[in-house]
Image (tube, rainbow, N blue to C red):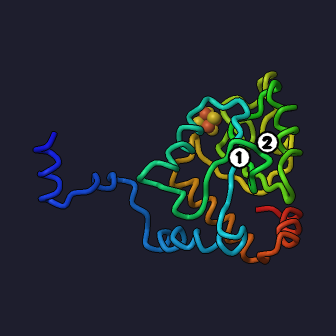
Amino acid sequence: MIKEILKNIATKRVTIPFPEGFAVSPEKSAKIVSLGQKVDKIFGRSLRIRQVDAGSCNACEWECTALINPIYDIQRFGIDFVASPRHADVLLVTGPVSRQMELALKKTYLATPEPRLVIACGDCAFDGGAYKGSYAVTNGVAEVIPVDCYIPGCPPTPMMIIQGLSEFMEQLTGIGKLRGSIAAFKKNPL
Ligand code: SF4
């Protein structure tokens, strides 16, 4: 162990290399770097997300969980997950919304402070995805609560979620940074 530590100090190696295939174009990279500035401008330095599993297969949750690992480190943008909708700026909903989760999702939405922004994350959240047409699901978040943004993918990768958040922020920035303006945005979602 001591040998390994000394070797790492000597080689100045502090972390593993970024995995292959995860690279983003310089253009997208620049957009993502500006995500923190957008969060700063619109939400006063911190964007708090309440993630709601509305009957997903859990793969979408794994990707969301990866957002806070050292590779994606979404907290560097001032974004973090919270345990209560009462502390959240945005609900990020995954899954097709099973009938069992329908009422819980409505209650969670109502417990979220205005302007109650909602992101539907993953193909299931969009229209039921792999479960579409099943008697046990509602075929997407929009059938239960209003949706402001969709992030596609089955599941969306952490980078796709970051890009989705970035583009969502861009839309909000374009309209204005005041919460009243965000409410106006809800009438014309992405
Ligand atoms: S979108 Fe795909 S990964 Fe996400 S909950 Fe549905 S089936 Fe699972």
Residue in the image at 76% along x and 62% along y: 190
Residue holding disc 1: 50
State the residue in front, 9 or 52: 9
Please tell me which of labels 1 and 2 falls first in the chain.
Answer: 1
Dot 2: within a 10 Å radius of its alpha carbon, few (fewer than 14), some, or many (20 or more) residues?
A: many
Residue holding disc 2: 141
Q: Is residue 29 left or right of residue 144?
A: left
Q: Is residue 95 left or right of residue 33?
A: right
Vertical arrangement, residue 42 with respect to residue 159, above or below:
below
Vertical arrangement, residue 72 with respect to residue 105, above or below:
below
Judged from the image, the secondary structure of the residue bearing numbered disc 2 is helix
Q: Quadrant of residue 79?
A: bottom right
Q: Amino acid at mark 2?
A: Val
Residue in the image at 81% along x and 24% along y: 100
Judged from the image, the secondary structure of the residue bearing numbered disc 1 is strand
Q: Position of residue 159 (x, y in %)?
A: 51, 55
Q: Is residue 36 left or right of residue 170?
A: left
Q: Position of residue 13 (x, y in %)?
A: 21, 57
Q: Is residue 49 left or right of residue 99?
A: left
Residue lying farthest top?
Answer: 135
Quadrant where the N terminus is found in the figure = top left
Dot 1: within a 10 Å radius of its alpha carbon, few (fewer than 14), some, or many (20 or more) residues?
A: many
Vertical arrangement, residue 68 with respect to residue 23, above or below:
above
Q: Quadrant of residue 143?
A: top right
Nearer mark to the viewer, of 1 and 2? 1
Q: Amino acid at mark 1?
A: Arg
